[in-house]
Every structure is written in structure tokens, then in C-alpha cells.
Image: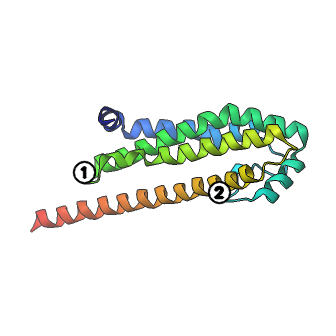
Amino acid sequence: MENIVIWFFRVTNIRLIIGMCAVYLIFPLYLLPNIINAGSIGPLDLLFWYNQDTLYQMLTGYGEAIRGRYIIGLLTVDLAYPIFYGTLLTMILALIIKNFSIPFPKKIIFLPYVVVLFDLTENSMLIFLLSTYPTKHSVIADTAGFVTATKWSGFAIITMILIYLVVYGIRSRQSKATNNTH
């Protein structure tokens, strides 16, 4: 594990992150809308939370063709997407910690992969529910909604950590600069 941490801190730089951000934009702007096209109803995994009633109402509204496309999208693009954004967020965390010399546990950079795990779990549950429709699996449907909410909560936590680290790093630099001028 330590070697992977070292690798992330060694290879991460601003040019790599800018390039990855450019590639990242292809996912939400082109690939996800075109492959996971859930019609006017929208995809389940963009909701913050849902219960079995909402889930099955949406699955019914999709119709057979959209349910089939949704499964294909979850098995292709939405399989690569979480891994890509998890790696991007991990590199952003590494860059912030490295550039600001923040005395934080370096393994915190792997926090985005917890969200990736929830995203992939959510996708697996949705594939199962889409492929077994119209059979209802109440517990799995409610659990899928909980997993989706946990994924989005994880994003909120990572965002707060990123903001905290940047503010901490800026204040730390300002404090050092002030102390060096006196």
C-alpha cells in the first residue's frame, strides 16, 4: 500500500490533473448522457436518495428499450467512470497535500475510492434490478437507494476535505511568509 501512496505523490502534477480533467469532461458531457439515456425520467443514480416505490415507478417509466440501454451503460461507461473520477480525486488530494506540504496522513488520498466502491455497488444493484424487472426485490431496491445516498454523502465529505486542505495550506503558507518577514 505504501508503494502505491508513494507512486501517487511522485507522478501527480498539475499538467496530469488538467489533462485528466479534460478527459473527465467527456464522461458527463458526452458518454453518460448518450449511453445512459434514461429518457425524460433521468437515471436513478443521479438522485440523492430513492426508495423502492420511486425506483419501481422509474423502472416502469423507462420502458424495455431504455432499461436495456441503461444496463449496457452501467456495464460499460459507468463502470469506467467511477474508477476514473476516483483516480482523479485521489491525484487532486495528493497534489494539494504535496504542494502545500500539509502534515496530513498521506493515505487520506484514497478516500475517493470509498465513494468508488459505493458507486460500483450501486451500479451492481441497479443492473440486477433493471435486469429482473418486473420482479420486485424490495430490500435490494431500498438498499440501492441507501447506497446511492451514501455515495453522494461521500462526495460531499471529499469536497469539504478538499476545501479544508486548500484553506489550511494557504493559511499555513501565509503564516510561514509572515513569520519569515519578522
Instruction: Say what secondary structure mark 1 lies in.
Output: loop
Res. 133 mark: none
Query: Does 182 sit above or below residue 166?
Result: below
Between 125 and 103, the residue placed more toward the observer is 125
Q: Position of residue 96 (x, y in %)?
A: 35, 50
- Image position of 80 (left or right of 73): left
Mark earlier in primary sequence (1, 2): 1
Query: Does 177 sit above or below residue 147?
Result: below
Q: Position of residue 158 (x, y in %)?
A: 47, 55
How many labels, in total? 2
Q: Quadrant of residue 31?
A: top right
Res. 101 mark: 1
Camera-near label (1 vs 2) is 2
Residue at left offset 36%, top offset 44%: 94
Q: Identify the amino acid type marked 1.
A: Ser
Q: Position of residue 19 (x, y in %)?
A: 48, 36
Q: Residues within 10 Å of mark 2 (few under 14, many from 20)?
A: some
Query: Does 51 sit above or below residue 107?
Result: below
Report the residue marked by disc 2.
Answer: 146
